[in-house]
Amino acid sequence: MASGETLVPRRTRSSAIELVAIERRFDDGVEALAPLTLRLPAGSFVALLGPSGCGKSTLVRLLTELDRPTRGSIHKPFDLKMACVFQDPCLLPWRTVLDNAALPLELAGVPEAERHAVTKDALAQVGLADAASKYPAQLSGGMKMRASLARALVVQPTFLLLDEPFAALDEITRQALDDHLRTLWKAWGFTALFVTHAVDEAAYVADRAVVLSRRPGRVVLDHPLDLPADRTAALRSDARFAAQTGILRNALAESGGAL
Amino acid sequence: MTRRTPWGALLPPLVPAILVVGIVEALVRGDVVPAFLVPAPSQIARALVDEGPSLYPPLAQTVKASLLGFFLAAVGGVTAAIALASSRRVQQAIYPYAVFSQTIPIVSIAPLLVIWFGWDRTALASAVIVSIFPVVANTLAGLRSTDPALVDLFRLYGASPGATLFRLRLPAALPQIFTGLRVAGGLAVIGAVVGEFITGQGIGGAIGVAQQRQRVDIIFAGVLLASLLGLGLFGFINLAAWRTLRSWHVSESRH
């Protein structure tokens, strides 16, 4: 992965992110998360799998501090730089791709020249160098998601939280982005948490898969994926891959999730 | 491609206009309708030319009152909506009165406006009062319908309330703000003319005088000028909306 001069991937290893016995009970009595403990070592790539309504979204909101746990605690390294990518690319339709991707820097008060340089680098890394002056309405679904990825990269994250990022895309685009994400992760060394309900995608993109139970969500399987570090399309039809996805599918089925 | 510009939209409505003008002209010339009740379009055109010197100075007054009134309503309306949107409590406390104020007929308070603002500013005050509400209502609706996912995104990146307002909520509300401005443009002219009926100035005043002189053609000429003014303002707002929104909003990009 060619890295730009202004956007240098961080290789610093900070400490792990830890969720310790977190619970979340809503005002209407719904328990979204049972005591849930999860450790994300720095630089790891973890996929979080679970049936719909298992509290995945709640977990994401807790990690992004848009919501607080009822009980338990979340430990993050003090120098953590978090960025998020959601299923909806969340682009501002009145801004060009460049200005959309530069938004976090703009909000942080980074001067225009500097933030444009950094953002152009990020756009180049996600393959959108030529689309900088386009508006979101002119982009395909995959390109919108790449723009959303670029917006996450400009903050030079040490932790990238991805909440079903490619779920709305077609199969081919999704697989291309899975590959691209993995390449970025290797180049940047950030910690990645990939929330998904797709077993194959989880196994392909991550190094470790955590399966949650039906609501209230708790960890039913924490499984290091026994697969080579270099993932290629051929792996998807490999017997080892089938074995790994089989383990995840079983855990999901036992957790009460429909497949 | 002509239909992508606002100008291309001008052609279709011209057809019925030409038809109606032609039919009225024929009816009056054929003595089917008496000319002292409905003047022939050609007679209105002649009045516009002959009475020009007496109609154009009042028109200038009406133009000034409507444009300034529209401008004040636009700025004041958007500002008021921002203030109302800033707190649900404030909005609950104030908004019902804003709605209630809409039930007061402007003509009934026009004499008050003369006492409060003086003869020269009554038309302006009337234009503002009549046209501000649609700006407030539409801007408020726009500010309140910001995509929650985008609000979360701004929170995530630590945006200040000011940054969230100016970089997210106001731009996102622009289509609705323009809807309010379009309505306000026409209402500002109506408000100004209503005020002028009381003060005797402007096109409203000129129409009042023409009524006393039984000059139906001048009344029609005045009405025509006032509605052309409203139409011009509407066109200007549409052009501004198109230029602002064409690159990103469906309302202006896929006619």
Image (spheres, coloured by chain):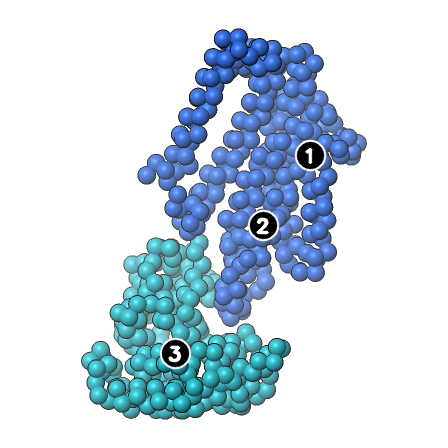
Chain colours: A cyan, B blue
Task: Tell me which amino acid carries mark 3.
Answer: His
Q: Are the residues tagged 3 and 2 within 8 Å (C-beta)?
A: no
Q: CA distance from mark 1 to mark 2?
A: 21 Å
Q: Which mark is residue A197?
A: 3
Image position, residue B202 (x, y; %): 65, 23
What's the residue at 42%, 49% (across, down)?
B250
Task: Tell me which amino acid carries mark 1.
Answer: Ser
What's the residue at 57%, 88% (across, down)?
A72
Q: Which mark is residue B139?
A: 2
Residue A103 appears anywhere in the view: yes
Please give the chain letter of the residue carrying mark 3.
Answer: A
Regarding mark 2 in the picture, which secondary structure is present there? helix
Image position, residue A251 (x, y; %): 38, 89
Residue A154 appears anywhere in the view: no
Regarding mark 1 in the picture, which secondary structure is present there? helix
Measured along the vertical axis of the image, is residue A7 above or below residue B99?
Answer: below
**Which residue is labeled 1 in the image?**
B126
Write down the quadrant of residue B62 in the picture: top right
Q: How many dots with numbers?
A: 3
**N-terminal label among 1 and 2:** 1
Tell me the quarter of the image containing the C terminus of chain B: top left
Q: CA distance from mark 3 to mark 2?
A: 39 Å
Image position, residue A104 (x, y; %): 46, 66
